[in-house]
Image: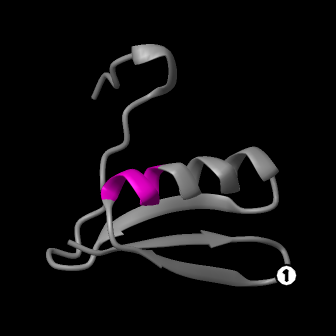
Amino acid sequence: MRYHITGSSQVGVMGLKRDTLEGALKKANELRQQGIYNDVQIIDIETGDVVKEPLPDGDQAGN
């Protein structure tokens, strides 16, 4: 599978591709830690779905 990583900033938008989910998660976390990009998301190229990422510290998302 392949994944797109998207994010936006005051200057513009960026998009990256990664071949594995592990690589996409790692890069998305790096981008968030930099604090430059807002709204960082991982999108599965095959389905077009936004990947639900695990929360830090093993927390569960409550929808």
Is 24 within the magenta? yes
Q: How is the image coloured?
A: one colour
Residue pointed to by mark 1: 11
Q: Quadrant of residue 20?
A: bottom left
> How many discs mark residues in the rendered view?
1
Q: Quick check: 11 left or right of 46?
A: right
User: Residue 37: percent from the left, percent from the top?
Assistant: 73, 62
Task: Give the residue at x 77% y 71%.
Answer: 9
In the displayed structure, does residue 31 sit left or right of residue 11?
left
Q: Please tell me whether residue 31 belongs to the stretch shown in magenta.
A: no
Q: Quadrant of the C terminus?
A: top left
Q: Nearer the viewer, residue 50 or 23?
A: 23
Q: Position of residue 33 (x, y in %)?
A: 74, 44
Residue at image coords 25%, 79%: 45
Q: Position of residue 6 (x, y in %)?
A: 53, 72
Q: Residue at x 16, y 79 (%)?
A: 46
Determine whether, in the image, residue 53 is placed left or right of residue 31: left
Q: Is residue 3 left or right of residue 30?
A: left
The range drawn in magenta is 21-25
**Front in this rendered view, residue 39 or 55:** 55
**In the foreground, 13 or 2:** 2
Question: How packed is label 1: few (under 14 Cα within 10 Å), some, or many (20 or more)?
Answer: few
Q: Quadrant of the N terminus?
A: bottom left
Q: Residue furthest left?
A: 47
Q: Amino acid at mark 1?
A: Val
Between 49 and 33, which is closer to the camera in this rendering? Answer: 33
Q: Measuring 33% from the left and 19% from the top, which residue is drawn there?
A: 60
Considering the whole magenta stretch, tell me its main secondary structure. helix
Q: Which type of secondary structure does the marked residue at label 1 adopt? A: loop
In the displayed structure, 22 sits above or below 6; it is: above
Where residue 3 sits in the image (x, y, percent)? 34, 71
